[in-house]
Amino acid sequence: MGNCREGHDKHICQLKDDLEKVKKLVKDAQHVCKNCGRAARSEDNLCNPTKL
């Protein structure tokens, strides 16, 4: 995956089947992925994050 950081298995794009886990990660989002547009509280859960 282009421009993807380490730990891809923890990124929201890989957790789409675990809605409860995703809900916790996106609450009070502070970052958005420049690849897919998903938002998360921690940049650790995004492939190519930037601060909102």
Image (cartoon, grey):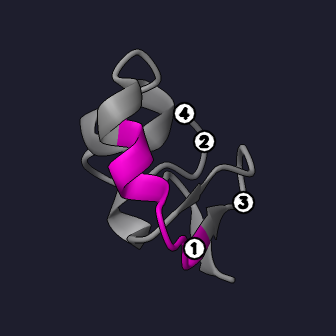
Question: Which of the labelled discs sits on residue 2, or is there none?
Answer: 2
Q: Say which residue appears at 38% left-offset and 55% top-offset.
A: 25
In primary-sequence order, the first of circles 4 and 1 is: 4
Label 1 close to label 3 by CB (< 8 Å): no
Q: Say which residue appears at 47% left-offset and 23% top-offset.
A: 16
Label 4 close to label 2 by CB (< 8 Å): yes
Label 3 Cα neighbours within 10 Å, binned few <14 / some 14-19 / many ≥20 = some
Mark-to-mark CA distance, 3 and 2 = 11 Å
Local SS, label 1:
strand
Q: Which residues are magenta?
A: 22-31
Q: Position of residue 49 (x, y in %)?
A: 56, 68
Q: Is residue 16 above or below residue 2?
A: above
Q: Is residue 52 above or below residue 8?
A: below
Q: Say which residue appears at 27% left-offset and 42% top-offset.
A: 10
Question: Which of the labelled discs sits on residue 34, or is there none?
Answer: 3
**Towards the viewer: 8 or 21:** 21
> Is residue 8 at least partly visible in the picture?
no
Queried whether the magenta region covers residue 24, the answer comes back as yes
Mark-to-mark CA distance, 4 and 1 = 19 Å
Q: Amino acid at mark 3?
A: Lys
User: Which of the two discs, 3 and 2, sits closer to the camera?
Assistant: 3
Q: Say which residue appears at 57% left-offset and 52% top-offset.
A: 3
Q: Position of residue 1 (x, y in %)?
A: 54, 33
Question: Which of the labelled discs sits on residue 1, or is there none?
Answer: 4
Q: Is residue 17 above or below residue 11?
A: above
Q: Amino acid at mark 2?
A: Gly
Residue wearing tag 1 = 31
Queried whether the magenta region covers residue 27, the answer comes back as yes
Mark-to-mark CA distance, 1 and 3 = 9 Å
Q: Position of residue 6 (x, y in %)?
A: 29, 52
Label 1 Cα neighbours within 10 Å, binned few <14 / some 14-19 / many ≥20 = many
